[in-house]
Amino acid sequence: MKSRILSLAIIIAITVISLLRITNGPESIILHWSFAGEADSYGPKYLILAHPAISIIVFLLIINQEKHPYDTSLLSEQSRRKSNPKVIRTIMPILMVVILYLTTCSAQMLPMSSIVLFSLIFLAIIIYIYKSHKQIKH
């Protein structure tokens, strides 16, 4: 429940930042960065609304996977018995923070740093693996 509330709070922050950027910002946002963190593609500012939409879709997909773990699973029967969809809920706030970071960088509120982005993704992967192995042992 805590991860859902935290994720929803982050989604609200993403939405607020996106709406503020549309109402009070320049006509373009950053769409893409190089590995060095330099902006190399720009687009119209309304495209920042994709960030809250993506975060809501990710949130709903994770909640759906938790409620109906076997309906959308492409895993074998043996893998399904070992897996626990609640493990994904643990990393959901980290995934939302990744989207929040991308939103603030697109809005040009923060500079893009590949190290920050990859560190967050790496952290989510490590926690997922750890929780999955811990779940299998029990």
Image (spheres, grey):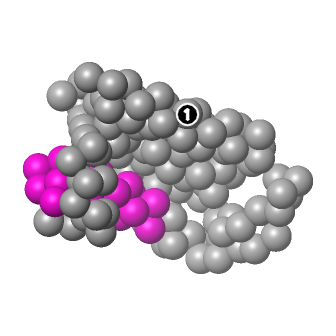
Q: Is the magenta region chiefly helix, strand or loop?
A: helix
In the image, residue 17 sits, relative to residue 46, either above or below, namely above
Q: Position of residue 69 (x, y in %)?
A: 17, 54
The residue drawn where x is 31% and y is 63% is 75
Q: Position of residue 130 (x, y in %)?
A: 47, 28
Q: Along the line of sight, which residue is nearer the eye, 60 or 89?
A: 89
Is 90 positioned to the left or the right of 110 in the image? left
State which quarter of the image contains the N terminus: top left
The residue drawn where x is 38% and y is 35% is 132
Residue 52 is a magenta residue: yes
Could you tell me which secondary element the residue under label 1 belongs to? helix
User: Can residue 64 be seen in the rendering of this structure?
Assistant: no
Which residue does the numbered mark 1 point to in the structure image? 126
Q: Along the line of sight, which residue is nearer the eye, 31 or 133?
A: 133
The residue drawn where x is 71% and y is 67% is 32
In the image, residue 1 sits, relative to residue 18, either above or below, namely above
Q: Quadrant of residue 40?
A: bottom right
Which amino acid is tagged 1? Ile
Q: In the rendered picture of this protein, how many numbered marks are placed on residues?
A: 1
Q: Position of residue 16 (x, y in %)?
A: 39, 47
Is 11 positioned to the left or the right of 70 in the image? right
The span shown in magenta is 50-70
Q: Along the line of sight, which residue is nearer the eye, 36 or 45?
A: 36
State which quarter of the image contains the C terminus: top left
Residue 135 is a magenta residue: no
